[in-house]
Image (cartoon, rainbow, N blue to C red):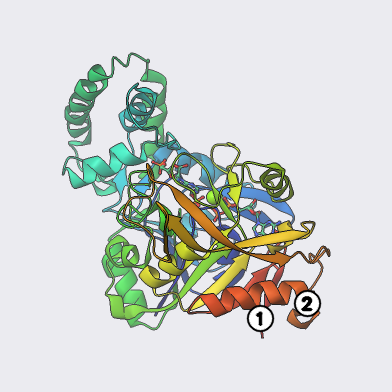
Amino acid sequence: MVDVILGLQWGDEGKGKIVDYFAPKYDMVARFQGGPNAGHTLYVGGKKIVLHQIPSGIFHENKINLIGSGVVLDAVTLKKECEAVAAFGIDYRKSLYVSERTHLILPTHRAIDRASEAAKGRDKIGSTLKGISPAYMDKTGRNGLRVGDLLAGDFRKKYDQLKKKHQQILDTFSFDEDISQSENEFFESIEFLKTLKIINGEYFINDAIQSGKNILAEGAQGSMLDVDFGTFPFVTSSNTITGGVCNGLGIAPQKIKEVIGITKAYCTRVGSGPFPTELHDETGELIRKNGNEFGSTTGRPRRCGWIDLVALNFACMINGVTQLVMTKADVLDTLDVLKVCTGYSVNGKETTQVPFQMDGISIEPLYKEFTGWQTDITGIKDFQALPPQMDTYIDYINSTLEISVKYISNGPGTNQLIVAQ
Ligand code: GDP
Ligand code: IMO
Ligand code: MG
């Protein structure tokens, strides 16, 4: 049986914390897409750690952590992260597995990402510059190199061939940075990667399902960054939604049971692209300050705004969400007025549907206003003890979505999670 945890907005919904919270119930945690563009924050014994490539179950004993074939893997980041995890006393050699079909991010992928984002006359996506889009382009373009290729004798030859192609692309950008240092690091790191458990991920996971093991698929990014259903072209390059679990891990759809979707009590976005409920005023600043809304991977300030029920409804629909988690509710503790976006006015016409194209058109969010609870909720453990204004806020959200909030996160600590009744 496979359950999924994924983000319903533009990423950073608190997936790391929620995976860490639920991990004890599972035998395996598997990443199915994305790469080191992800930054999943966990607190281990009060110490903060941000995971980019390793699944967020790594700190739990006797759990298998699988980097699935739908992921794009940066060996340099992985090596550093393994070292960071080992410093917490974790024996990753025992618990970390890598699918041989996982595509590799090469130093030239990162260079192409940088060059293409720096190029004039193009829409800047505001990518994390981790080489994600070039690596996925090489996968769908059928040029990419996979972890399994590292084990064959001709890897260097294949690498040099692909590098030549990449050099041609870099020449079109007049890119002339010296990448020899990152190449040295890459070759050092792939030697390390080769010493890990490299396996056939699809048999591995299906055998585990067959023998009754419980698996948690951990999403990265968020549904509005999905390459097909997000705010294209301001998206990432993978399928971040439930559908991505099947092709990212090699499992059949009927094996998926619970889809645990995460939304913040408000909205954030890092990087460029449409964000209808974005706040450009002091309330936005206050949310950024209260929520410490700075990118876990890049440190960039996150854009902040009100919760968007149009986008959230859409995300619940395309993912088939069965359990809804609302994180960072405590971030709204000091606000006197809260707003919830219930519809859009698109070029003057009202709708509750996400439009085909969200940039280059006028989208005016339609809001319903609520009184803030202005109470510190971070110590609350019992749903009944939540302030009444918060009940009203959540009841309204529940009545608008087809699913009700089941868990409310009221602080970054793993145990700061209230079960709604
Ligand atoms: P992810 O990418 O979805 O795993 O999320 P990130 O780790 O990038 O960002 C979420 C941030 O919010 C992290 O700094 C978490 O420690 C923090 N966080 C998670 N849940 C809560 C919560 O309920 N309240 C507060 N205040 N912070 C939270
Ligand atoms: P987690 O898993 C938030 C955003 C980037 C950029 C766009 C494309 O921590 O939620 P990419 O590097 O993927 O080509 O960038 O996607 N982005 C994220 N935003 N959280 C993430 O991951 C993100 N991963 C990518 O900022 O706008
Ligand atoms: Mg993050």
Q: Residue lying farthest front? A: 348
- C-alpha span from label 2 to label 1: 14 Å
Q: Nearer the viewer, mark 2 or mark 1?
A: 2
Q: Position of residue 377 (x, y in %)?
A: 79, 67
Amino acid type, label 1: Ala
Q: Which quadrant of the structure image shows residue 313? A: bottom left
The tag earlier along the polypeptide, 2 or 1, is 2
Residue for badge 1: 420
Callout 2: SS: helix
87 to the left or right of 166 = right
Q: Determine which quarter of the picture holds residue 419.
A: bottom right
Identify which residue, 403 or 43, lies in the foreground. 403
Residue 363 visible in the shown view: yes
Amino acid type, label 2 = Pro
Residue 7 visible at all:
no
Q: Give how far across and how far down residue 319 sits, in percent.
A: 39, 70
Residue at the image position 27 percent from the left and 63 percent from the top: 247
Instruction: Give the label on residue 97, or none.
Output: none
Q: Is residue 404 left or right of residue 272?
A: right
Question: Mark 2 — residue?
Answer: 388
Residue 132 location in percent, x, y? 36, 41
Q: Residues within 10 Å of mark 1 (few under 14, many from 20)?
A: few
Query: 54 above or below 261?
Result: above
Secondary structure under the numbered disc 1 in the rendered image: loop
Q: Residue at x 39, y 72 (%)?
A: 317
Q: In the rendered image, which quarter contains the C terminus?
A: bottom right
Which residue is painted at 49% across and 52% down in the image? Answer: 364
Which residue occupies the foreground of this view, 20 or 6? 6
Which residue does the image show at 73% across and 72% down from the upper left?
Answer: 390
